[in-house]
Image (cartoon, helix red, strand yellow):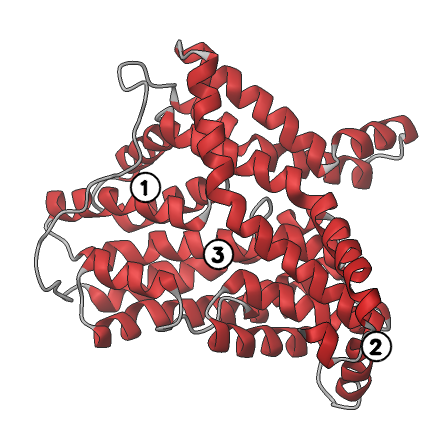
Amino acid sequence: MAALFLGLPIENISPVLQKGLGEMLGSITLIIVFGTCIGKLAVSSGAAKVIAKTVMNWTGKKYVRLGLMITGFIIGIPLFYSVGFVLLVPLIFSVAHQFKLSKVYLGIPMLASLSVAHGFLPPHPSPMALSSILKADIGLVLIYGIIIAIPTILIAGLWFSTRFKNIKTESDHEILNVEEIKNEGKLPSFGISLFSALFPVFGLTITSLLPLISDNQKLAAICKIIGDPSIIMLLSLLLCTYTLGIRMNRSMSSVMDDYTQAIKDVALIVLIVGGAGCLKEVMIVSGVNETIVATLNQINIHPFLLAWMMAAIIRVCVGSATAAGLMTASVLLPLLQSNDLDPNLFVLSVGAGSLMCSHVNDPSFWMFKEYFNISLKDTFKSWTVMESLVSVLGIVFIFILNALIH
């Protein structure tokens, strides 16, 4: 429809869409699929449960919110947001019942961590797709994202949640964990669970940092080959298949069933990402994005802030963080090419804007309201404000990091 409105000849539309779809999905489909398979296995093997219980035992009641925040961040890296949400909410309710504390008070730090991981950190679909569109280094996006994420969740999660100590839910119904653990009798150790779930993070970080601290050309070449995100994710999947599957006495057919379900779950996200690729190509061929950027360049505003604002506006309008980020990147690609900007921080600027002001058109808003069973007013006061804080703090720390490294 956009191609027709922008004046593309009908006979050219199909090739343009095919090119946009192929270029986008060709670079990141394997990464998204491998990532969701790893997350599914982390849940079904009990690795996510082991990580959560171990961290909570370390922190105890005094630092229970810090423990929940750390758990959310660790588990949020390999898991898609909705899966992490459903997995961790029962843990929040269990801790709230045990320590007689408000569920919202305990939930905000953990869910802030999940949200930051979803918006900032590869291998989540939005940061991966943004990195592909903007030609960013995925390893550096991950490293910068973690640096920015830590102070952001400390403020938007840990500090902000203190105002909800006394917030009451309308009833005390329990939400059951719908994710089945298939080898309950034999759970992996904490070390194996953590190493397996975070292997993509370790791999991308190491292969990105080693060439920066060593002049060895052979080492740099090896890191370039192994550090390709598709290779890292494939190695991670093979590792998890053994450590969280075969090693736990699960049959290969059972593990494959998990992977089949994971791929079904991610199909819609892949289509959304592919649609963004089509839109990007239509924008490029029609010349609309260059016109928009030429107009925006006349505005005296930093490109990072401009990208954040555009993503935030689209997020408020459409509700989806992934769609907001991808639409913004498609339009602003020439802005990055015409300015001497760090593409890694540009990715994070768009990601931060895409988390702004979650409200009634965002499914996560309703998930939070219904699971915690609170009023609309309290949902806006807690969830919506927390998401907005994550977004605003994200762009603030991006500017600070940009000043430090450039």
Residue at 79% in and 90% down: 298
Q: Residue 182 in the image: state x and y as whole percent.
A: 32, 22
The label shown at residue 287 is: 2
Write down the quadrant of residue 295 in the picture. bottom right
Mark 2 and mark 1 residues within 8 Å of each other at the beta carbon:
no
Q: Amino acid at mark 3?
A: Val
User: Counting other residues with Cα less than 10 Å from the Cα at mark 3, is it few (<14), some (14-19), or many (20 or more)?
Assistant: many
Residue identified by numbered label 3:
116
For the residues labelled 1 and 3, the Cα–Cα distance comes to 17 Å
> Closer to the observer: label 3 or label 2?
2
Amino acid on which the number 2 mark rests in the picture: Gly
Report, in whole angstroms, how far the alpha carbon at label 3 lies from the one at label 2.
Answer: 33 Å
Question: How far across and down, in percent of the image, does residue 38 sit?
Answer: 51, 31
Q: Residue 331's image quarter?
A: bottom right
Q: Secondary structure at mark 1?
A: helix
Residue 322 in the image: x percent, y percent? 55, 60
Q: Residue furthest front?
A: 11
- The residue nearer to you, when weighing 266 against 368, is 266
Residue identifier under label 1: 87
**Type of the residue with mark 1:** Leu
Of 23 and 375, nearer the camera is 23
Does the image show residue 403?
no
Q: Nearer the viewer, mark 1 or mark 3?
A: 1
Position of 169 relative to 142 (above/below): below
